[in-house]
Image (cartoon, rainbow, N blue to C red):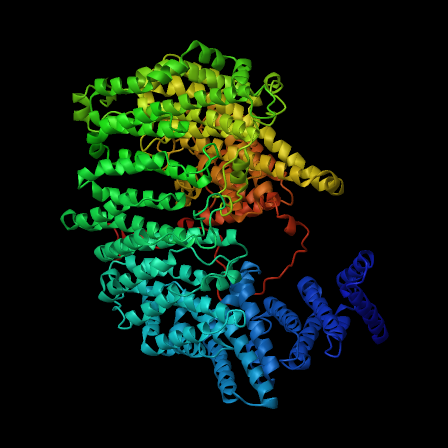
């Protein structure tokens, strides 16, 4: 036997060396690996060989393999071993713990880890029932030395992780071990605290000792670190009383250890976990002791000591600073929870000192540390009680001052112009990564700033005013990052730009809050007008700084309405920015920064006219004359800019509150557009695809800028301008919000049967004239995708209908790197211009229809044969329209009919459901079901083919093809979600909750074939669709089919919100047997595809149970489906059916029924690829320790308990 073991060990050692040798060929490595795995699976010599290989005389690699063999035996063969074999293995493992390792400093960490895993695997199988003295044996081991103590700590930590954190055991075993741990927690904590204190004391005694004593000191330090790590694994879940006992003795020790460089990180981890605990407020009250002088002083001094070191030399110290910052933030969270609550905690005397510590992190050079404090500052400044405290009010001003630095975007990893950069190189991989982080960090700062400004509004105004005046008077500093396009201009990273940008964010946050927080008579109007005047007088030719100036004008405008004489000056400033250009080559293309300034100015004008139209009304004539002058002067304006100015005029004109006057203005404004759009030339273009392609130049080869190419560009511009203008007017023209004003102005034309007023819109007449050609354009655009029209595209424009690069990035979730291209000219290629034209054309058509539904209301829905007209245009040639073009149509349908401005108000009136929505939605849902099903089949086939022919695919698939497939799949996924979102808003009332909240489940009673309840669950439109059997079945089919499409997000949402809500309306009817079995099978198929995701698995199991329980009594075929589930327990199925079908059978509660049903259908639940070939570990349950199992019956069906007698009026016994 010994010879056999020795020979086998020799072979195993050779195999391990072959596996680990870097020079070994792949074939030999695989053979050696196969030999080792077969040995572990089949050999009877595993235990003796494992023990021999684990001997400490062997090399570490061999020892680790020996321990792996022993772990494998315990995990997979333990149940088949004899009792004496188990005892022998346990004794050998304890022997290894006792003297099978080198000293604590010499032993490899992976050996310690492997050895602790062996012991934990045995504990999981035998403790406490068959190994009651385990804790005592562990305690005894610690007396043998530091190495053994560290191993014991590793064992206790891994046990807690497996049982509590990862829960890798069967329920009963987990419960047994957890309850035993809880029962012994006092002694376990005392034991760990004792170990910690002894080793910390010994470690401190030997500080600065030379020679051998230094090794002893390191050994004590290693044990202390292991103990702290183990404590961290327990602090997370033990009762709070163990953490706070002895006047928070544990927390006191942890605070003391913050001053020890070798232990401070682990101590901070423990503190962080403790401070992050939730629970009863009364139990958390002792945490306030950390606001005492001593604790706060330790935290402050630890932070100062760690921060005084170089980051590269002391990266561990930087990690410690992060943890310490998190500890302070968690402590602030406890403070906010306790102060002002029922437990009556006073505001700590040391609150100022605590906030100073927090402010130190907020003003630290690390952007990451700054951002970590924001949530805590926000909680403090929003807190009802704390925000009124004098110390917090005082700190709010300091925070505002600190924000002046923190809002400045500095610290790019690639640069070295700021102390922040050094830390950013540790925290961020690239400038883009940092830029993305800083944008979210600045958004956080904005939220906190707004809260701060509510506390000290006037101080905030003073700080903002000083900053703005300073920026206005400061010379522009381009730094070493000047613009590449024009001399003397800034780039995004120039010092002046980052300062202006930061100040602008501050001003926006501040002004918006002082208007809300300060009474009107106390508002600093005069000072703000001085500021506004200074901003209006400020002149700059730098587009990036001008953009910030415009934002400041917009920010201060709400205060300017108190001084109306400023309004014309504001408009003049904005008008100048609309036509802004840099003085260089007249025909050079604008940079992105210039385009953004012009767009910014247009947006500011629209925003002012939208939010303050009554104040802009006196400026209307000046505005209108200026616009007419601009349009006729030949100044270079884009179509979008022209239409933005028209949109602003329409917004002001709504204040006329006179139908005839508004209509006359709209007629005048739109005269040229109506004439152009309804001309014979444009009509001919819009109604004929070949003429259309020729008109826009898509059938011509463009090699250079020719005259005919210019003509085509002008033609495209004509169409674009018409659509932008129509959209602007339809979107903004409106009647007065006040009913009396609307009546007086002649807008009300009658009342609905329900008594609601019916209005007329000033632009209706114009829209009705323009609409036929609009529908024709939609129809023509759809027909452009027909093969014969695709063939008409010239070689130059053959890719004109493909998805644009910018859209691709959005779909694939890729970021736009704007840092380098912001000041470069926007030079689009010919094909990019054509792609952009088609994209905006298609979008604008649907935007116009959407806005018409919202703005015109009855006048739009009363249009004769509207349904036929829309179906005859939007639904034409859909088979050829690509998926990325369908998305705008679906999206606008959602907005147009269901989400105007208020979620509670349906845009489409109820009386038009039958005549308009049913004829549109019926064919659309039927078509989308067929289309999406085909798309997902292609994706599934592609996946399976890739799996079967992987090697061939590697040769064939180039990177571009893979990216294209990913893009197509993602577009299908987004289209699917939008179609299902349309279905949801169409049918499902927002009051519907998750299926688990259905009444029949909550009260634990069965309702066989629960009757249809078409009440609050369906919208009014949903009830209307329910009357159309074919249409409703399309909705059901689409919902249930989508469960097995490879989109887990869609599956969860549809299963939880839609499927049962739709199906329960018809369960009482005479459903076909095939339909019922198909619905049920579809859910099981969804489980097969998405079962690996716990959220989907839970939702789909719930849905399957609802269908089975409600339909099984009438449809025997459902049992037939169940019997086909792999590995189903037919006896358990019979019992489940018996309880379901037999009225006299005892009933279980909802939770137990759910558990039983999930066990029945477990064979259908799909697994993740990484789990499919994993060998199962089976841990047997041991006799229960603590209580008898509950009887298998519900308390409702139990024998009389005497409760009824207590309330009986005839009870004589009382």
- Please state the horizontal and vertical placement of residue 157, each as a whole percent of the image: 55, 70
Quick check: 1103 above or below 621? below
Position of the N terminus by quadrant: bottom right
- Please state the horizontal and vertical placement of residue 247, each as a whole percent of the image: 35, 78
- Please state the horizontal and vertical placement of residue 454, each as a whole percent of the image: 25, 54
Quick check: 459 above or below 1138? below
Question: Which one is in front, 519 or 466?
Answer: 466
Relative to 530, is 853 on the left or the right?
A: right
Q: How many marks?
A: 0
* Outermost left residue: 521
Is residue 446 at least partly visible in the picture?
A: yes
Quick check: 589 above or below 120? above
Relative to 162, is 637 on the left or the right?
A: left
- Please state the horizontal and vertical placement of residue 49, each as a whole percent of the image: 77, 71
Is residue 747 at least partly visible in the picture?
A: no
Q: At 37% from the left edge and 38% from the top edge, which residue is drawn?
A: 600
Please tell me in which quadrant of the rendered image residue 393 appears: bottom left
Question: Which one is in front, 26 or 566?
Answer: 566
Quick check: 434 above or below 193? above
Relative to 433, is 49 on the left or the right?
A: right
Relative to 488, is 566 on the left or the right?
A: left
Position of the C terminus by quadrant: bottom left
Q: At 67% from the left edge and 54% from the top edge, which residue is drawn?
A: 1174
């Amino acid at each position: 036997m010994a010879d056999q073991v020795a020979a086998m060990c020799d072979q195993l050692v050779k195999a391990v060396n072959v596996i680990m040798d870097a020079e070994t060929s792949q074939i030999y490595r695989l053979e050696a690996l196969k030999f080792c795995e077969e040995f572990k699976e089949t050999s009877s010599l595993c235990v003796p060989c494992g023990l021999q290989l684990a001997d400490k005389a062997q090399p570490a690699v061999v020892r680790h393999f020996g321990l792996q063999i022993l772990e494998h035996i315990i995990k997979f063969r333990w149940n088949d071993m004899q009792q004496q074999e188990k005892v022998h293995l346990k004794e050998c493992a304890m022997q290894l713990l006792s003297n099978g390792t080198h000293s604590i400093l010499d032993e490899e960490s992976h050996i310690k880890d492997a050895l602790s895993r062996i012991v934990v695997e045995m504990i999981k199988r035998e403790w406490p029932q068959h190994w009651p003295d385990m804790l005592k044996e562990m305690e005894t081991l610690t007396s043998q030395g530091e190495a053994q103590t560290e191993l014991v700590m590793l064992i206790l930590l891994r046990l807690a992780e497996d049982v509590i954190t990862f829960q890798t055991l069967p329920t009963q075993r987990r419960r047994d071990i957890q309850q035993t741990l809880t029962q012994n927690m006092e002694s376990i904590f005392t034991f760990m605290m004792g170990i910690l204190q002894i080793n910390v004391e010994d470690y401190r005694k030997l500080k600065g000792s030379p020679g051998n004593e230094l090794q002893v000191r390191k050994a004590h330090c290693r044990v202390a670190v292991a103990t702290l790590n183990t404590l961290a694994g327990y602090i997370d879940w033990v009762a709070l009383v163990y953490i706070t006992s002895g006047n928070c003795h544990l927390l006191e020790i942890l605070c003391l250890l913050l001053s020890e460089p070798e232990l401070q990180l682990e101590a901070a981890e423990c503190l962080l976990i403790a401070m992050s605990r939730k629970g009863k407020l009364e139990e958390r009250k002792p945490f306030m002791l950390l606001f005492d002088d001593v604790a706060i002083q330790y935290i402050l001094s630890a932070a100062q000591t760690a921060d005084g070191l170089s980051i590269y030399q002391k990266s561990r110290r930087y990690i410690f600073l992060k943890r310490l910052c998190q500890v302070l933030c968690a402590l602030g969270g406890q403070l906010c929870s306790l102060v002002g609550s029922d437990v009556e905690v006073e505001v700590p005397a040391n609150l100022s000192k605590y906030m100073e510590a927090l402010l130190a992190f907020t003003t630290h050079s690390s952007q990451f540390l700054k951002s970590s404090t924001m949530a805590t500052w926000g909680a403090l400044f929003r807190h009802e009680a704390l925000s009124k405290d004098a110390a917090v009010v005082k700190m709010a001003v300091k925070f505002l001052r600190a924000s002046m630095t923190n809002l400045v975007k500095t610290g790019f990893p690639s640069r070295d112009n700021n102390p922040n950069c050094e830390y950013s190189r540790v925290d961020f991989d690239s400038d883009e990564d940092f830029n993305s982080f800083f944008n979210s960090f600045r958004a956080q700062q904005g939220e906190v700033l707004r809260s701060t400004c509510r506390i000290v509004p006037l101080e905030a105004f003073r700080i903002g005013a000083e900053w703005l005046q300073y920026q206005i008077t400061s010379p522009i500093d381009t730094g070493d990052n000047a613009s590449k396009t024009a001399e003397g201009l800034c780039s995004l990273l120039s010092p002046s730009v980052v300062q202006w940008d930061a100040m602008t964010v501050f001003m926006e946050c501040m002004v918006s809050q002082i208007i809300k927080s300060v009474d009107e008579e106390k508002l600093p109007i005069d000072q703000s007008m001085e500021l506004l005047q200074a901003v209006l007088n400020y002149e700059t030719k730098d587009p990036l700084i001008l953009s910030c100036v415009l934002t400041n004008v917009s920010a201060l405008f709400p205060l300017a309405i108190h001084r109306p004489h400023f309004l014309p000056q504001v408009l003049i400033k904005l008008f100048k920015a609309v036509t802004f250009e840099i003085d260089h080559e007249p025909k050079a293309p604008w940079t992105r920064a210039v385009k953004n300034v012009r767009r910014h100015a247009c947006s500011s004008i629209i925003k002012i006219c939208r939010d303050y139209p009554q104040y802009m009304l006196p400026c209307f004539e000046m505005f209108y004359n200026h616009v007419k002058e601009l349009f006729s002067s030949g100044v270079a304006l884009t179509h979008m800019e022209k239409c933005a100015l028209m949109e602003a005029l329409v917004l002001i004109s709504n204040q006329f509150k006179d139908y005839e006057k508004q209509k006359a203005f709209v007629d005048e404004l739109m005269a040229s557009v109506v004439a152009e759009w309804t001309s014979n030339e444009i009509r001919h273009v819009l109604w004929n695809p070949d003429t259309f392609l020729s008109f826009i130049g898509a059938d011509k080869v463009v090699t250079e800028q020719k005259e005919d190419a210019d003509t085509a560009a002008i033609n495209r511009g004509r169409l674009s301008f018409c659509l932008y203008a129509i959209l602007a007017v339809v979107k903004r023209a409106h009647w007065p919000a006040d009913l009396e004003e609307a009546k007086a102005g002649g807008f009300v034309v009658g009342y609905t049967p329900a008594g609601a007023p019916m209005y007329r819109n000033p632009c209706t007449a114009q829209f009705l004239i323009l609409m036929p050609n609009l529908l024709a354009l939609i129809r023509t655009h759809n027909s452009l995708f027909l093969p014969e029209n695709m063939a008409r595209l010239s070689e130059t424009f053959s890719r004109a209908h493909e998805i644009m690069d910018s859209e691709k990035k959005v779909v694939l979730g890729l970021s736009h790197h704007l840092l380098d291209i912001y000041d470069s000219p926007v030079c689009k290629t010919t094909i990019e211009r054509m792609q952009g034209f088609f994209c905006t054309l298609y979008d604008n058509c649907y935007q116009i229809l959407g806005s018409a539904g919202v703005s015109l209301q009855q006048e739009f829905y009363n249009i004769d044969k509207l349904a036929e007209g829309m179906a005859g245009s939007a639904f034409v040639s859909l088979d050829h329209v690509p998926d990325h073009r369908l998305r705008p149509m679906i999206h606008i349908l959602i907005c147009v009919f269901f989400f105007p401005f208020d979620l509670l108000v349906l845009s489409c009136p109820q009386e038009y459901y039958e005549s308009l929505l049913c004829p549109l939605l019926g064919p659309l849902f039927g078509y989308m079901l067929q289309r999406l099903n085909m798309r997902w089949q292609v994706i599934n086939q592609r996946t399976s083919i890739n799996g079967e022919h992987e090697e061939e695919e590697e040769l064939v698939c180039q990177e571009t093809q893979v990216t294209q497939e990913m893009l197509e799949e993602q577009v299908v996924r987004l289209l699917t979600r939008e179609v299902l979102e349309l279905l949801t808003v169409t049918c499902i009332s927002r009051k519907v909750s998750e299926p688990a909240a259905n009444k029949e489940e909550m009260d634990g009673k069965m309702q066989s074939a629960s009757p249809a309840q078409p009440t609050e669950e369906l919208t009014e439109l949903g009830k209307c669709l329910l009357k159309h059997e074919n249409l409703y079945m399309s909705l059901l089919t689409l919902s249930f089919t989508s469960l097995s499409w490879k989109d887990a997000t869609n599956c969860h949402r549809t299963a939880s919100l839609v499927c049962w809500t739709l199906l329960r309306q018809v369960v009482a009817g005479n459903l076909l047997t095939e339909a019922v079995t198909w619905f049920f099978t579809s859910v099981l198929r969804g489980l097969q595809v998405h079962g690996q995701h716990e959220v989907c698995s839970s939702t789909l199991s719930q849905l399957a149970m609802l269908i089975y329980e409600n339909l099984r009594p009438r449809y025997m075929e459902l049992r037939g489906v169940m019997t086909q589930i792999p590995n189903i327990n037919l006896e358990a199925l019979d019992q489940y059916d018996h309880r379901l079908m037999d009225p006299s059978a005892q009933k279980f509660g909802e939770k137990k029924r759910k558990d039983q049903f999930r066990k029945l259908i477990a064979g259908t639940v799909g697994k993740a690829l990484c789990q499919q070939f994993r060998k199962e570990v089976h841990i047997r349950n041991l006799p229960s320790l603590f209580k008898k199992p509950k009887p298998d019956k519900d308390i409702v069906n139990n024998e009389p308990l005497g409760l009824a007698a207590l309330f009986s009026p005839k009870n004589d016994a009382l």
